[in-house]
Every structure is written in structure tokens, then in C-alpha cells.
Image (cartoon, grey):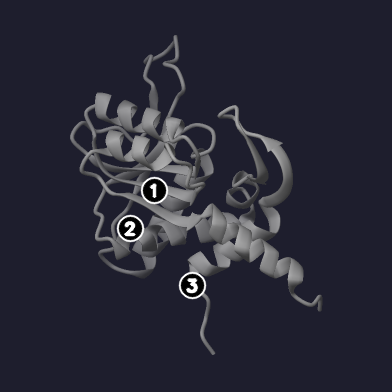
Amino acid sequence: MTIPTHAQRLLSLLARISFRLGQFKLSSGGTSDYYIDCRTTTLHAEGGRLTGHAVLELLEEHGIEAEAVGGLTLGADPIVSNVATASAWRALTTPGAPLLHGFLVRKVEKTHGTGRRIEGFFREGARVVIVDDVCTTGASTVTAIEAAREAGMTVAAVVCLVEREEANGRPAVEAAAQDAPFLRLFSANGVREEHVRQLAAPQA
């Protein structure tokens, strides 16, 4: 019996609790016949665990080495925390496994305290991975990329959980990422197909 991977189990959960068919207005201003709220899954106890391990495995698959993972608040927050926690768990069970610390990018710099825009891990010159939940126009991902670079960090890769495959999304992210690869765990069509498959499956 083949044991499903973390990514396969994550896809099943995303399709079940985060995907909806209907008529929806998107933050980009457009409309769509489906909506994916990844936070329903990334803030789910098991969904969060699967997210952390699935992202780590994707990075390992592509040979990405980094010291930290971060993204624009709010969509990236649970992804960042889950990946950092998963890396700590792996370091306990697999000697030599790298730790990935977490950082969050504020939408605007805070006006008190240190006045920093980046919270959490910060080291100039560090290699980091930028994460996001859903990539539509890529605007939030690009903002996080630019903030990390302005802070003096090197973007090693960009990861989104679900890519909506809009015409301008991937090109915008890839232009901002420059030489860093833009990776995705799932396409929106892949999540839709799994959602429809689950609806058609006989109920136990």
C-alpha cells in the first residue's frame, strides 16, 4: 500500500475545506467562478502540519538552501510558522537537517519601536525563501520579494501553495524574483479537479 505524500494529503484537504464553487469577487477586482481560502487549511491543525512539510519537501526536491522563510502578512503568516516548525521537527529527527527561521513582512513600516518592516528573522546577506498562499496577480508576493531585498537579504526561491495561473501573475513574480525560481505546490485547476473528484466520490 502506497502512503500518500504530505503534498497529496494537503491537496485533498485544500480541495475539501478551502475550495468553493460559485461567483466571487477577487481582491484583484476581477471575478471568478471559484474561490480558494488557503487560510482555512493552513490554520487547520493537520493542514498546518502538512503545509510545513510539503513546502520543505518542495524546497529539497529543487535543491533550495536557505536560512529563513517569510512573506507578506496575512496570507503568508501561517505558512511561515508551519514551515519553521516543520524544519525544527526535522532537525530533531534527522541530524544535520537545516533550520528555517521565519519572518513576516508588514504591509507598511510600523511607526514606533524599531520602525522595521520585517518582523522575526533578519540578517543582511541571508538566503531566504518567500512564500504566499495564493498567487493571482502576484502583487503580494512581489511586495515581499522587494522588502526582503531592500533589507539586504538574498531571495533563494519563491513558493506559493496555489497558483491561479492568471495571465499576469507568474510573469510578475518571475520578473521580481530575477534568478530565483518560482515554485508552486498546486495549480488552481489541480485543486478544482480534486474538489470535483471528491464531490463525485461515493459517500462512505
Tags 1 and 2 in contact by the CB under 8 Å rule? yes
The location of residue 128, given as percent across then percent down, is 29, 42
Count of labels in the image? 3
**Three-letter residue code for mark 2:** Leu
In the picture of the structure, the residue carrying the numbered disc 3 is: 5
Q: Is residue 17 above or below residue 155?
A: below
Q: Is residue 43 left or right of residue 78?
A: right
Judged from this view, the residue extending furthest toward the top is 111
Task: Depth check: give the residue in front, 148 or 87.
Answer: 148
Q: Name the residue located 70 percent from the left edge and 68 percent from the top edge.
A: 198
Quadrant where the N terminus sits is bottom right
In the picture of the structure, the residue carrying the numbered disc 2 is: 59
Q: Please, what secondary structure does the residue beneath circle 2 have?
A: helix
Task: Depth check: give the residue in front, 106 or 184.
Answer: 184
Which comes before the other along the chain, label 1 or label 2? 2
The location of residue 89, given as percent across then percent down, is 42, 61
Judged from this view, the residue extending furthest toward the bottom is 1
The location of residue 24, given as percent across then percent down, is 70, 37
**Three-letter residue code for mark 1:** Val
Task: Depth check: give the residue in front, 136 or 150.
Answer: 136
Judged from this view, the residue extending furthest toward the left is 125
Q: Is residue 66 above or below residue 28?
A: below
Q: CA distance from mark 2 to mark 3?
A: 15 Å
In the picture of the structure, the residue carrying the numbered disc 1 is: 159
The location of residue 176, given as percent across then percent down, is 29, 33
Q: Please, what secondary structure does the residue beneath circle 3 have?
A: loop
Few, some or many C-alpha atoms within 10 Å of disc 2 (few <14, some 14-19, many ≥20)? some
